[in-house]
Amino acid sequence: MSQLKTISLSHLDNVPSSPGKFKPDKSLTYIHRLRLHSSVSKLTLWLALFLGLLVFFFFLSPPAASPPPRRSLGSWGGSRWEKRIRTSARVRSRSSFTVLVTGAAGFVGTHVSLALKRRGDGVIGLDNFNAYYDTRLKRARQEMLDQAGVFVVEGDINDKDLLNKLFDVVPFTHVMHLAAQAGVRYAMQNPASYVHSNIAGFVNLLEVCKSANPQPAIVWASSSSVYGLNSKVPFSEKDRTDQPASLYAATKKAGEEIAHTYNHIYGLSITGLRFFTVYGPWGRPDMAYFFFTEDILKGKEITIYEGPDHISVARDFTFIDDIVKGCVSALDTAKKSTGSGGKKKGSAQFRIFNLGNTSPVPVTKLVNILEKLLKVKARKKFLPLPRNGDVKFTHANISLAQRELGYKPTTDLETGLKKFVKWYISYNKGSKRSSW
């Protein structure tokens, strides 16, 4: 080994350190050629064996099936599908609207779609029927909408081809954008779903709307959650919203900024509605009033969260019928977009409103009302409010909505919960569902 090293080093000593002519040793060159020829021969042999094995296994394996073409969640397209779209979009009079309602099989979306259809507007629903909560409730809402003449397309707002197709078939005058990934606490388990729906999905919808001709006016659901850690009460639209307490709130705040951008650049007429704790029949099972009702009836213990000094968390509970009136009024007062085919032709309307009840109620009082209506004593456990995105209280200042929309909530919490409980018992008795 030492001799080989010596030969190698002595050979390197013969190489000049500066450029010039260099005559290599002929005997060493011949040896290198022999070694190179031997290495190439071995490499060729192994390469031939490897390729042979590849060919053998290729012919031995069965042919792979070609992947199906990517489509939306539901089956869409075709003459029959387009006929259903046009039928659902049919208006009662020339002054009626043609509205695309996203999230139509959701809680608020169902009620708004029914209200619009009943007054003569053309309504097309869009929903992806995700499994954030039991889809049986969403399908039941869909069935109710279908009976009212509202066709709900199964698809995602991130599917640009589907959205473009809908706008090709129907020249929508308005879009009521209610599709979103809801829930404050779930954001800690699945944060990507909030970005996917509340930001990417919203941008995708705005992209289609800004390129439409004519552009629709847009009303969309923001949230009272944008007020975050703001301690000034009641919450006003002029208050700061730069301290979100949850990812859900952050995505809704981002949505408001994105909406302003599309309004400014493309002339889209956009109205944002900050909902305050909506409740009522056909509601969401992830909301406290809903799962409290279920657990109380089953004799299960319920958890009530408290702030500092054992002060109960309070919410500005707003009944669904009042929210629907606010949504419809926002559509009625929305001015036309000023752009066309993606180009702005003038400044467009941009608004944000609080839609609440103006009277925060402690969660302990909510439970007391449910006990009275259900005639069952709740088993309660009190815990400090965890740091999971929930805030201690919400309280809406609705003076702007009163002035601009004529918004005036009329349903107190006990009256609203009485309607909810009546629906809940009837629905679960009729469907024979023991759990969600």
Image (cartoon, grey):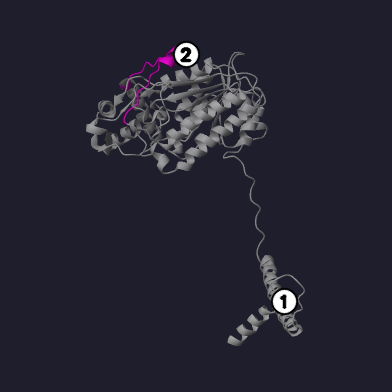
Within-10-Å neighbours for mark 1: few <14, some 14–19, many 20+ = few
The percent position of residue 146, horizontal first and vertical second, equals 53, 28
User: Cβ–Cβ below 8 Å for labels 1 and 2?
Assistant: no
Query: Would you name the residue on which mark 1 appears?
Result: 40
Position of 40 relative to 329 (above/below): below
- Quarter of the rendering containing residue 184: top left
Picture quadrant of residue 72: top right
At x 64% / y 48%, what residue is drawn? 68
Coordinates of residue 149 in the picture (x, y in percent): 55, 24
For residue 33, what is the image quadrant? Answer: bottom right
Q: Which residues are magenta?
A: 392-413
Secondary structure category for the residue under label 1:
helix
- Eyeballing the image, is 312 above or below 386? above
Q: How many neighbours does mark 2 have within 10 angstroms: few (below 14), some (14-19), or many (20 or more)?
A: few
Q: Is residue 403 magenta?
A: yes
On residue 404, the disc is 2
Q: Amino acid at mark 2?
A: Glu
Q: Nearer the viewer, residue 29 or 344?
A: 29
Instruction: Identify the residue at horizontal 37%, vertical 15% (top origin).
Output: 410
Residue placed most toward the observer, 241 or 369: 241
Element type where label 2 sits in the image: helix
**Residue at 65% of width from left, 64% of height from top?**
61
User: The N terminus appears in which quarter of the rendering?
Assistant: bottom right
Question: For residue 198: magenta?
Answer: no
- Against 127, residue 12 (above or below) is below
Residue 62 in view here: yes
Badge 1 amino acid: Val
Q: Is residue 419 left or right of residue 74?
A: left
Which callout, 1 or 2, points to the residue nearer the camera? 1
